[in-house]
Amino acid sequence: MADAIFEHPRLAALYDPLDPDRSDLDVYVAVAAELGARTVLDIGCGTGTFALMLAARGIEVTGVDPAAASLDVARGKPGAGRVRWIHGDATALPPMRADLATMTANVAQAVVEPDAWHGTLTGAREALRPGGHLVFETRDPARRPWEHWNREDSHQVTDVPGTGVVESWLDLVDVSGPLVTFRWTCVFASDGAVLTSDSTLRFRERDEVEADLASAGYVLEEVRDAPDRPGREFVFFARRPEE
């Protein structure tokens, strides 16, 4: 089930305006070029920013996401007709032979249940051609980023075109082992509406992810540092073995 931030139409429409700097995706565009990918599966594509960046470069892209409202935003963007959009997740994909599958930003960590995580890795592998790559990132738990998920560090007031002024912030709700839950609050000045969305992320250790990839039938090629967030994230490069 998708979080309200992605599923509620009014919140999904705010996702891009409240986080306009997506320079983190430039890394993945470069990865697609490095690997010579001509077909890409964007798992957890959300509002479609990354999928559209690739499509604009002539790459054949399939974007899959469980949040219908986020896909509605994606489908309304210029160039959206170049992308195949699928409402669902990586566990039930149509047949494809992608060169590259990706999970950008928090997508991998948002799959919190072990069975769902294994199903996601397996589904991605089945969608790849033999020799195709899965590339995704997870935050290093040792850096404890959730300690900054509070109103003081996250509060912002944004004038959103077509919506008006929106006040927003994060609050940490719970930390239970590897599971971290936080709440996103938005206050709409136009009508005083207050909407919240709770999200839970799973912080996996590097060796745990490596073991999960091996169990799902991948060959781990390397683990890189995120160039835009050095020392804070692991970027995994895994390959479906040649048959």
Image (cartoon, rainbow, N blue to C red):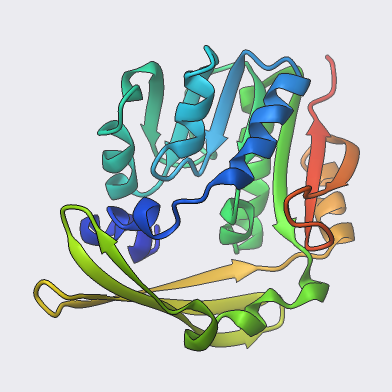
Residue at the spot 70% in from the left edge and 44% down from the top edge: 136
- Would you identify the image quadrant in which residue 114 lies? bottom right
- What is the x, y in percent for residue 80? 34, 25
Q: Quadrant of the C terminus?
A: top right
Give the vertical position of 155 relative to 165 (above or below).
below
129 or 227, which lies in front?
227
Q: Is residue 229 visible?
A: yes
Q: Is residue 174 left or right of residue 163?
A: right
Q: Is residue 93 visible?
A: no
Give the vertical position of 238 relative to 187 (above or below).
above
Q: Quadrant of the N terminus?
A: bottom left
Residue at the spot 40% in from the left edge and 47% down from the top edge: 66
- Would you identify the image quadrant in which residue 43 lies? top right
Residue at the spot 81% in from the left edge and 57% down from the top edge: 230
Q: Is residue 71 left or right of residue 42?
A: left
Q: Is residue 217 left or right of residue 19?
A: right
- What is the x, y in percent for residue 131? 80, 18
Residue at the spot 77% in from the left edge and 41% down from the top edge: 216
166 or 12, which lies in front?
166
- Would you identify the image quadrant in which residue 121 lies? top right
For the image, the number of numbered tags is: 0
- What is the x, y in percent for residue 100? 67, 25
66 or 193, which lies in front?
193
Give the vertical position of 108 relative to 124 (above or below).
below
